[in-house]
Amino acid sequence: MEYLVEMKGITKRFPRVFANDRVDFNVRPGEIHALLGENGSGKSTLMSILAGLYRPDDGQIIYKGRPVSFRSPRDAIRAGIGMVHQHFKLVETFTVAENIILGDRNISFVLRPAAKERELTELSARFGLAINPGAYVWQLSVGERQRVEIVKMLYRGCQLLILDEPTAVLTPQESAELFANLRRMADDGRGVVMITHKLSEVMAVADRVTVLRGGRAVAAMTRGSFSERELATAMVGREVTQESRRQGSAEGRTVLEMRDVYALNDVGRWGLEGVSLAIRSGEILGVAGVAGNGQRELAEVITGLRPVQRGRIFLEGQDVTNLGPQALIDRGISHIPEDRLGTGLAPGMNAIDNILLKDYRKAKGRAGLIDYKAARSRTQKLVQAFDVRLAGLRAPVKLLSGGNLQKLLLARELSAEPRLIVAAYPARGLDIAAAEAVSRFLLQERRRGTAILLISEDLDEIFALSDRIIVLSGGRVMGEPLRTETATREQVGLLMMGAGGEAKAV
C-alpha cells in the first residue's frame, strides 16, 4: 500500500529526555489516522517534526514516495503538510483574516480585504467553523482561536492535515459536520492525522490508530480491531477506571446566586445579558456552550476580573458584586481559568512561587518576610498529594506537560478549601489519565460540600460530572436548567446552537 507519508525510526532528544525513540508512523492517502497517548508521550513532538518545527536527530521522512527534510513549517506547508497546534501560532494584534493569509505568497500585490474576508467566511461556513474575519485575535476566546487555526490550514489547501483536539470547541452537530468534511477530504485522497483524547471520536471516525507511550509507538490498530477499553489501556499502560460521578442529588444551601447580570465583552458589546443562576453546596453546575458565547465573561464576573454593568452577585447571601479578585479569594472563591499557563500560573516562576501567588500575605514570618522553608515544605506536600510530576521544585513551570500544569493549578486552588470553585475547561487538552485525575479531584471537592461551576465545551465532561446543566448562547441562558439524568446530548447541542429554547432565569 502506497503511503502519503512515512516516518521511519524517528528519534528526537531533548536535554535528559527522549521525546521520540525510534518511532515508526505512516499515513495512507484517503484515511483518517488517530494519534493517541498521554501528555508527554511524544505525540506533539512527532507531529512537529512532520510539520517542520523540529528536525529529527535520527530517522527518515518519506513524503509522496520521496525523502524530505523540512527546515521550517513553511517548507512543510509548501509541500502540503499543515498542523493545527494545541498552543496556537497566531499574532494577537492582527485580524483573523490577516493571520490566515499571513505568509501566503500567492496573494497579488494589490490586496482586496473585503473580497478576501468574503472568501474566508464562505470557507469557514463550508466546514462548520464560524469565524469573524475582521475581528482581532486578542479579542477571541481560546476556542475561537482554535477555529482560526483550522481554517488557516484549510485555506492553504493542505494534502496532509494534522489536527490537535479539533472538536474541543464544537457542538455535537458541528463535530459531526466537521467529521463529514474530513471524510470528504480523505475521499479526495488527502490524509488526516487527528490527535485526540476523546476515544469516542476515534471509534467514530478513525481508520487506523497509533498509540505512543513514553516516546515509543506501543500499538498500531486498524478500524474494527480495537475497543475504547483497549485504547485506554494502551495509552496508560494499565486499566483505567472511571470513578462514579455522584451519589444522590445535592440539597445544600445556596452558595452562589446571580440575578439578571449584564457584563460587556472585550469589544464593548454585551457578553452577558440578563444571566441568572444559582449553585448549591455539594453541587456541580455544568455550563455548556460554543466558545465565545459568554463563558469567559461569566467566569470573570464571578471571580472579580470583569465588572458587572447591571445585576447583582451574592455569595452565601452577601452581596459581592464588583468586589476585586483578592476580596473574593479571601471569601473562598477559587478559580481554574481556561488559560492555565498565563492567567492561572506564571510560566517563568517555579512551583513554590506559583503555589505562593494567592496567599503570600499569609506566608510571611515574624520579620515580615516570606518563610520560604515552610513554603517549600507545603509545596512538596501538595506536589505529592496531587501527583504533580516535575524535574524539581525550583524549575520553571513552563517546562511541565499540560496535565502536570493543571494538577499544580488544582493543588493551589483546592488547598485553599474554597466554598466555590469556578472551573473553566479543566480537562481541555489533557490525556485520559490526566483528565481522570482532574475529574477525581473535582468530585472529591463536591463530596466535601464545595459548590462548583464547571464551564466546558466537552459534553462528555459535562454529562460525566454535572448535577445540572445550563447552556449559554449569545451571552444568555437558553431554556430551563436540565437534570443530567434526563438530558440528552442532542438537546444540549441544539441549545448550544441557539435553538430549542428561550433565555430563562435559572
Image (cartoon, grey):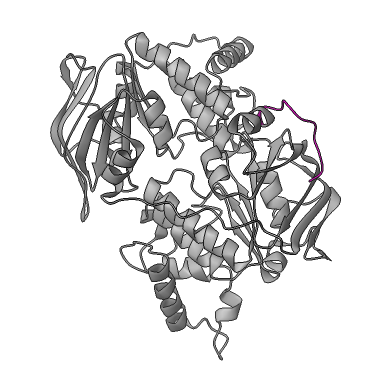
Query: Magenta part of the protein: which range?
Result: 496-506
Which residue occupies the foreground of this view, 278 or 363? 278
| Residue 499 in magenta stretch | yes
Residue 287's quadrant in the figure? top right
Residue at 76 percent across and 39 percent down: it is 480
Query: Residue 277: where, in percent of width, then height?
Result: 77, 49
Residue 97's quadrant in the figure? top right
Could you tell me how many numbered marks the image carries?
0
Left or right of 290 on screen, residue 260: right
Residue at 49 percent across and 8 percent down: it is 108
Residue at the bottom extreme?
366
| Residue 111 in magenta stretch | no
What quarter of the picture does the N terminus occupy?
Answer: top left
Can residue 21 be seen in the rendering of this structure?
Answer: yes
Which residue occupies the foreground of this view, 85 or 387? 387
Query: Residue 80: where, in percent of width, then height?
Result: 33, 17
Residue at 31 percent across and 50 percent down: it is 239
Query: Residue 345: where, in percent of width, then height?
Result: 50, 58
Query: Residue 327: where, in percent of width, then height?
Result: 72, 68
Residue at 33 percent across and 28 percent down: it is 73
* Majority secondary structure in the magenta region: loop
Left or right of 361 on screen, residue 17: left
Can residue 163 be seen in the rendering of this structure?
Answer: no
Q: Is residue 379 above or below residue 232?
A: below
